[in-house]
Amino acid sequence: MQVKQENAPNGSERCIDNPFNINATDIDAAIVDFLKKVKHFQDRAWKENPTKANSKRRLVYGLREVRKQLNSGTAQCIIMAKDIETADHNELFNEIDVIGQLCASQNVNMLWISSKHSLGKAVKKFPFVSAVAVCDFRGAEDLYEAAVGICEEFTACCRIADHVDQPSLFA
């Protein structure tokens, strides 16, 4: 039996027939590729006309700015880092919770990346970024669909893996 192989976004090969072969690095690579493409479009527009590009931003960085974009209804996708320290900061935890609720109420996809350092590196912000709102991803629809698809596959596999030891699907 031939097993189909596909190049994953991070350069490794993954088996198409085995959806459990998706890992966090595949998700991170897909999200980073998507963000780099959108960032490239934003930088190119800024070089042509900084004033116009500043008024029509494609990417917005930071939790408060992400929340503002969600409240105004211009955010199309939210990308958050998983390693935000919320243990000692209740208001930070509440901010993340409010962002999640706004995303759910407005049907905005919320993607998670493993670290805020890799998120900052993807959008060329030093030292790190906790959240990014994508306001316009025209031109990068294929990468957006790939990132969302990989995230959905991974989430579905995690849900199935959590119930593998169940004797019945209805238990």
Image (cartoon, grey):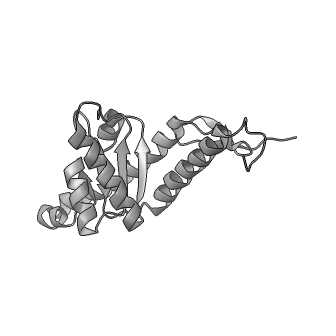
- Residue most toward the front? 171
- Residue most toward the right? 1
Q: Is residue 74 above or below residue 163?
A: below
Q: Quadrant of the N terminus?
A: top right
Give the camera-side residue of 63 and 33.
63
* Residue drawn at (63%, 38%) of the image: 162
* Residue drawn at (51%, 36%) of the image: 24
- How far across and how far down the image is residue 147, in percent? 49, 51
Q: Is residue 105 left or right of residue 15?
A: left
Give the camera-side residue of 120 and 48.
120
- How far across and how far down the image is residue 88, in percent? 24, 30
Q: Is residue 154 left or right of residue 78?
A: right
Q: Is residue 76 left or right of residue 91?
A: right
Q: How many marks?
A: 0
Q: Quadrant of residue 89?
A: top left
Residue 40 seen in the current view = no
- How far across and how far down the image is residue 37, in percent? 38, 53
* Residue drawn at (32%, 49%) of the image: 97
- How far across and how far down the image is residue 125, in percent? 23, 40
Give the camera-side residue of 168 and 4.
168
Q: Is residue 96 above or below residue 67?
A: above
* Residue drawn at (71%, 38%) of the image: 164
Q: Is residue 89 left or right of residue 136?
A: left
Residue 100 seen in the current view = yes
